[in-house]
Image (cartoon, rainbow, N blue to C red):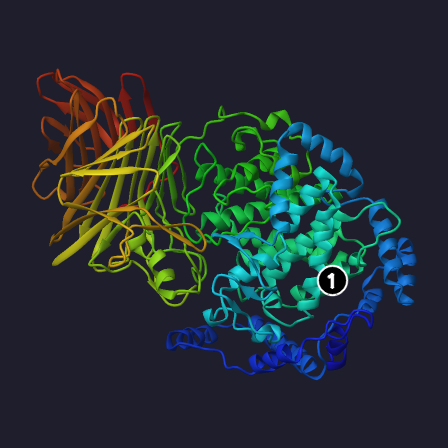
Amino acid sequence: MTASSVAEACSTWSATWSPVPSAEIWKSFKTALYTPQRSSPDAVKRYLKRIAAIDGAEVGWRARTTLRAAVQTAACWTNEPRWQRKTLIARLRTAEGLSVARAALERGDWNAAHVALQQHVMHRGSSFVLRPSNRGRVAASITKAYPTARADAAIRADRLLTGVRDVLGYQGVRFDGWHHDPVSRRYAPRAVWHRVPYLDPAFGDHKVIWEVNRHQHWLTWGRAYWLTGEDKYRDAVVDELASWMHANPPLIGINWASMLELSLRSLSWVWALHFFARAEARDDREPWLVDLLLGLDTQLTHVEQNLSYFFSPNAHLLGEALALYVAGLAVPELAASPDRAALGRRLLIVEAARQVAPDGVHRERSTHYHRYTLDFYLLALAVARASGDPIAAAFERIVTRLSAAARALADDDGRAPLIGDDDGGMLMPIAGRRPDDWRDSLAAASALTGRPDFAIGAPPEEAAWMTGIVPLSPAARPGRDARVGSLALSDSGYYISRSHGRHHLIIDGGPHGYLNGGHAHADALAITLSVRNTPLLIDPGTACYTTDARVRDRFRSTLAHNTLQVDGVSQSTCAGPFHWSRTSNAITHRWRSTGGFDLFDGSHDGYAPVTHRRRVLTIHEQLIVIADAVLGQGEHRADVHWHLSDRWGVQIAGRVVELTTPEDRVRLVVPQGRIESFRGDATTGLGWYSPAYGRVLPTTTLRLTHSGPTPFAMAGVFDLNPADPIEEVEWLPVWSEAGAVAQSSALKVSRRESSECVLFVEPARPSTHGRWRIGEFETDARVLYHRVDRSGKVTCLALADGSYVRSNGRRAFALTLGRLVPALLIDAFTIGTYTPCAASPGF
């Protein structure tokens, strides 16, 4: 690439529309161009370490991109960057159907070129989920299937016309231009793209600026335009397109700095092309289609040249590949489209193998980014189907894996917990869905894959827009009949215990994160819990990325998660907004699941030489026992935090915590330790949560504390049976053969009508099985649970990795299995067994 060719790409788009930057803007551009990037000592160390690990391929790629950026900088310095409509001639295909448009561009008749392009789009076939010529039929079908859609679309779209926007977690904000952060009231500098310090909070929050520049609100206006026929929504998009291109000449400013942002904006422009092209021969508006195609091609070229192969080879690269693939097929007017589609197709397949684990979970360890990835491949699949691309079969397999994992991670209302980072964004926010509501993505997956078990309830309207299927097939309307049971997503380390309609528990027993762990949190062995589809134990969220380093670090620290903290130290140590200087990894020793009970047993190395080991036993419909062991030497303090959804009222009476909503009641009981409650506490940082990026609200956090010589144990029991509530939990002694046990703990749970005992044992030699006893019961099982009624009769028994249980109590009881059984549950209603495919590693 030569300086002259770059200069041409950055030059004006026409004499009739020449948005020359003002002297003040141009001065700020030149100043920012040479402003040194701010770097902390830790950032420098990470940079040097990163350089040492660079291989030849990356060196070559970085050399090419650096050289290209330098040439672009020189070109922008010598020629004020402007658009030039006439350059669209070379960007269009030479197909016969575009000859009229090309001729009009050649003579500078922009309106005639616009009309010709619009007629071409209206009469060609469509490889997108929308076809402009089908607007009337689609609108009628949507209105029939969703009677309130038209009114809702108008309300949402009209509010946007007033200039008031809800952006991420910020409500009712107004932007003063395309480089403005209305929250901090700061502006990003007009520097050449690779010199924009967008992570520097001195220039505002790049997330807020980028969110409105994604132009995804154009989809809201497109929905309203199709359903109401009101031209004011189309006019708003045309005006904003003109405004945006005036304020964002090629390669200048924050809106050219992130390839993912350009990609998401390009996808919005593809939606706009198909929403707003129409059959009328004349168009009194600006020649917006000429400008849209010119801007789209320029942005996609920039993305192609700077793909995130080494910068953010995660969901960023997936989003960039998606834009190339979708635009390459959906906008055949551009000459580069076939090559872009081929590149995007290849990257989507290659990156799925890298970024999607065999269990279907996206490897970034963020439920929010998992939903992003699912939506990426849903759109890719829908476009592949619309275009007849044979790659659709491969995309369907990827969507199926992602959807199965998504259905497991979401509760039976379709709500997913905020595990890992939540950046508040979405791919297709057409009808106002919440980011943690996955029903529309799952409904779309159900329609595209023919898997009714993915859907939850009737499909939301947005799923129809996402797939182009209106209305969705009746096969995708199973209500809640397609139940999902407990399961292990073991490749990613998520273990899910669920009892339909009663609880949904996720335990994080896997690695810290993917690559640099940029979107991971210090949450090893943390849990989230919904009871009867109401969130109870929550992940407090993300709050922000760069605007407040202390808040960023606090919300992703161990303190902010439902796990155990030793000596006030986080398991993993933050080093900048998207890096870590020290990370912990969890190991799962045992997962057992059968019928009515689930058992998780894992540990992590974040406090070495001290080890935190957590066991979670769920007896469906009855209780959840969370037992923590702190193993090591010396005196230590341990804090277990329980971050509660603000839907629950909290009353503490000694070692009993009553948690209530108007419809429900759950009791938390602990055998020892002091329980404290915090709400919006500025000193400790406890009692806060972030329901959406940028919003921080008070809630209640409980803290259970114990100090003493290690090893010691802590526990909490959540009561799921309000009909016979737990009154007390106490520790029981464990009797064993001399030297047979390395670690053990046992609890007695007392109710009015029954009592329960829970035993956890780890033998001194993991390969052997000894004999141990709690109360009147003897067993060789690693885990034993039993319930006894008031008469002394055993009414429920569960064990893991054992061969017998016997009792010589008031009612003699004996169960001899003849072999070691991984899991067994016997109660008045159910007998179930479970045999794992492979042995779990010992502790």
Extreme residue toward the front, this view:
162
Identify the residue at image location x=76%, y=33%.
Answer: 137
Judged from the image, the secondary structure of the residue bearing numbered disc 1 is helix
284 on left or right of 436: right
- Reply above or below: 511 against 70: above
Image: 223 above or below 4: above
Q: Residues within 10 Å of mark 1 (few under 14, many from 20)?
A: many
Quarter-of-image position of residue 223 = top right
In-image side of 579 versus 196 (left or right): left
Q: Residue at the location (72% across, 48% down)?
A: 232
Q: Which residue is mark 1?
A: 297
Q: How many marks overall?
A: 1
**Viewer-proximal residue among 631 and 381:** 381
698 sits to left or right of 283: left
Q: Could you say which quadrant of the image residue 759 lies in? A: top left
Rendered view: 387 above or below 20: above
Image location (x, y in percent) of residue 354:
53, 54
